[in-house]
Image (cartoon, rainbow, N blue to C red):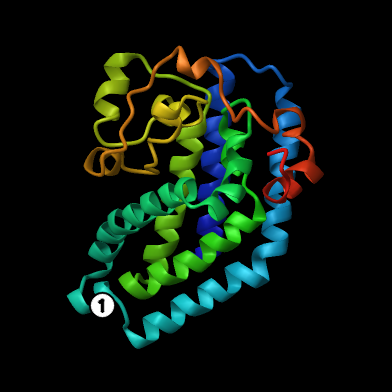
Amino acid sequence: MNAAIFRLGTFAGGFGLMFCLETLFPCRRWDVPRRVRFFFHAGLMIFNTAILRFPAVVPLVIWLKFVNSRQWGVAPMLGLSAAWNIIIGIIVLDMFDYWWHRFNHRIPLLWRFHKVHHVDTHVDVTTALRFHPGELLFSALVKSVWIIIWGPTLWAFIIFESCVSLAAHFHHTNIDFPDRIENPLRMIFVTPRFHTAHHTVSKRTGDANFSTIFIFWDKLFGSYGVPDYREMEYLGLPAGRENYLSIVPTLKGPFSSEY
C-alpha cells in the first residue's frame, strides 16, 4: 500500500469515527454550531496542508529517505527488524513528541504559535485540526532532528505519524468514559478526559498533561495532573476568545498582543 494513501486513510477514518462518537455521546454541549467549528477547522487544515506541502512535508520525506540510505540513527545501529523498528520507534518518537509539546509551553517563541491551538473555547475532534502553520513548520524542522537521531524507516515514521493523528483525534473528542473504563485505559493511553484537562485555564492541568499517545511520559517526567470536572467547565485561553473562529485573527495570533 502506498504510504500517502495509508496516512490519508487513517487520518480520515480516525477523524470520521471520532466525529460520529461525539455526535452520539457528547459530554459537553456546543455553544457554537458544530458546522461552524467543522468548516473553520477543516478549512484551516486544508490551508496548512496546501502551503506546507513543499516547504515542509516533501523535504522531510526526502530527508527521511536520505537518512535511511546512509543508515544513520540509533535504530539502524541496533539492527532492529522491520517490526521492532516500528514498535520501538513509536515509543521513542512519542517520547520526543512529549518533550516537543512541553517545550511549546515553556519557550515563549514556540508558545506564541502553539497558543493558537489553545485559544479554542471548546474541545472536540475538530480541535485536533487547529494549528498555526508556523507551529507545523517548526514541528517539521524538529522532526528532521528526530529522524537523524533515531533513524526510523519510512513505514515506521508513517505509522508513528498515523498513530499521533489517531491519538490526537481520540483525546480531543468530546466524549467521556465512565470510571470503570477511564481508569484502566488511562494507565496506558491519553484519554479525552485527561487531555481536556490540558485545555483548561487552570495552570495545574493546563500547564501539564503533555503526552500524546502514551500517558506514562507525564508520570515519568512529573507533569501528570489529575483531571477535575470543575476546572474543565472553562476551556481555552482568556485572551483571543472573541475571534477564535476567524481566519485573519487566527493567523495573526502569534504576532498580536491581543492573544
Residue 194 vs residue 106, the one in the foreground: 106
- The residue at the point 52 percent across, 60 percent down is 139
- The residue at the point 49 percent across, 19 percent down is 232
* Residue 33 visible in the current orientation: yes
- The image quarter containing residue 8 is bottom right
Residue 21 vs residue 70, the one in the foreground: 70
Residue designated by label 1: 76
Question: Where does the image place residue 95, in percent across and percent down from the top left?
Answer: 32, 53
* Residue 151 visible in the current orientation: no
- The residue at the point 30 percent across, 20 percent down is 181
Question: Where does the image place residue 89, in percent across and percent down from the top left?
Answer: 30, 61
Residue lying farthest left? 78
Question: Where does the image place residue 57, in percent across and percent down from the top left?
Answer: 59, 67
Residue 120 vs residue 2, the one in the foreground: 120
Badge count: 1
Q: Is residue 108 left or right of residue 186?
A: right
Residue 24 vertical placement versus 165 (above, below): above
Residue 25 vertical placement versus 103 (above, below): above
Question: Where does the image place residue 65, in percent across and percent down from the top left?
Answer: 45, 79
Q: Is residue 28 left or right of residue 85?
A: right
How packed mark 1 is, by other alpha carbons closer than 10 Å (few <14, some 14-19, many 20 or more), is some
Mark 1 element type = helix
Residue 73 vertical placement versus 129 (above, below): below
- The residue at the point 60 percent across, 48 percent down is 112
For the C terminus, the quadrant is top right
Residue lying farthest front? 257
Three-letter code for the amino acid on which mark 1 is drawn: Pro
Residue 16 vertical placement versus 226 (above, below): below
